[in-house]
Amino acid sequence: MAEKETECCESYEVHENLLKIVNKTMPEETKLYDLAELFKVFGDSTRIRILFVLFEAEVCVCDLAQVLNMTQSAISHQLRILKQNKLVKSRREGKSIFYSLADEHVRTIIAQGCEHVEEE
């Protein structure tokens, strides 16, 4: 299957008025980097599966390992990444540590992603 070539302008013309608007609204490079790093976290299906479980309930690593059919070590590794990126939070209760979504933004990001991939 041949890839369709991207269409380009027939002549080179810079639209200065549009570039001024873009330059005023473009976030700083550090914010763009942080945003790109955040979206990388969503690039792993195991982390997405963990987030879907956390949509339903606050759970411990044992619960996640059981429901996702994975080792506790593998789950812990993914939770560490999610926590470092402020997508999940944890709390201790006795000998157990329970994980939950950090805030409603996480649910919104995933919901909008689902809407996007389901569009025709």
Image: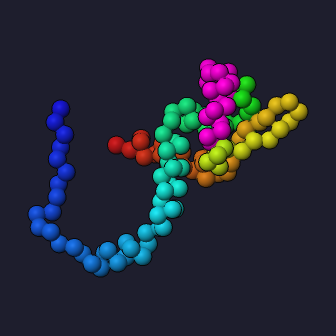
* Image position of 24 with respect to 56: above or below: below
- Image mark count: 0
Quadrant of the image for the C terminus?
A: top left
Would you say 112 lies left or right of 97 here? left
**Toward the viewer: 67 or 118?**
67
Is 60 left or right of 45, judged from the image as shown? right
| Residue in the image at 80% along x and 41% along y | 91
Question: Does residue 92 belong to the magenta stretch?
Answer: no
Q: Position of residue 116 (x, y in %)?
A: 42, 46
Q: Is residue 79 magenta?
A: yes
Q: Position of residue 63 (x, y in %)?
A: 72, 26
Q: Quadrant of the N terminus?
A: top left
Res. 53 visible in picture = no
Residue extending farthest to the left is 10
The chosen color scheme is rainbow
> Which residue is outermost to the front?
30
- Identify whether 38 is placed above or below 70: below
Predominant SS along the magenta part = helix
In the image, is residue 72 above or below residue 80?
A: above
Q: Is residue 14 visible?
A: yes
Q: Residue at x 51, y 33 (%)?
A: 45
Q: Which residues are magenta?
A: 64-82
Residue 78, given in percent of the width and then of the height, sits at 61, 34
* Residue visible at 86% across and 30% down in the picture: 95
Residue placed at 62% from the left, 26% from the top? 74
Quadrant in the picture for residue 66: top right
Image height check: is 74 above or below 11? above
| Residue 22 position in % (x across, y down) | 37, 72
In the picture, residue 19 is in which quadrant? bottom left
Q: Is residue 63 left or right of residue 22?
A: right
